[in-house]
Amino acid sequence: MAKYHNVKITRYGIKFDSLLELSVYEILRNQEIQGLIRVVGVHPSVKITDAGILCKPDFECMHNKGFTRGELFYVEAKGMETATWRLKRRLWVCYGPAPIHIYKGTAAKPVLHEIIKGGI
């Protein structure tokens, strides 16, 4: 069991912290198969301030097509918002190195809730 009573799942050789995170990965995987993006990393460590505050989004991706080709973005599956997450979200708005896509909802129906541009 993970925090908040989520069950950790291993699929595709990756350990997911929740069913929502797995569902979001499957959305990204479908986009990868279509050639739209490439999933570069899972749970990367990202410094979001000069003070070295770390944020660990669920996925790091890169655009493969269009005018954003080659640009990085991050993806976070957020089932439950904590005080820590709300603080890091505000920091990401000012200091984030790249956009972050926030998915919410349920494992059966994840929804892209918002895209935070970051302080690029």
Image (spheres, helix red, strand yellow):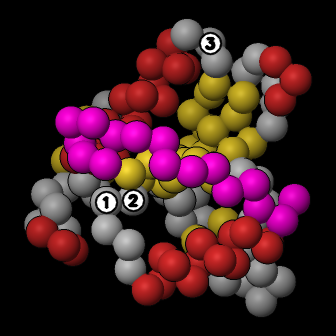
Which image quadrant for residue 82? Answer: bottom left
Dot in front, 2 or 3: 2
> In the image, residue 3 lies at what x, y percent?
21, 74
Which image quadrant for residue 70? Answer: top right
Work out which residue is located at the far bottom of the displayed protein and give it.
51
Q: Is residue 98 magenta?
A: no
For label 2, the residue is: 78
For label 3, the residue is: 35
From the viewer's perspective, is residue 51 above or below residue 55?
below
Name the mark on residue 2: none
For label 1, the residue is: 79
Give the residue displayed 21% in from the left and 36% down from the top: 108
CA distance separating discs 2 and 1: 4 Å
Label 2: element kind:
loop
Q: Amino acid at mark 3?
A: Gly
Structural crowding at the residue carrying mark 3, measured as other residues with C-alpha within 10 Å and reported as few (<14), some (14–19) or many (≥20): few
Which image quadrant for residue 83? Answer: bottom left
Quarter in which the N terminus is drawn: bottom left
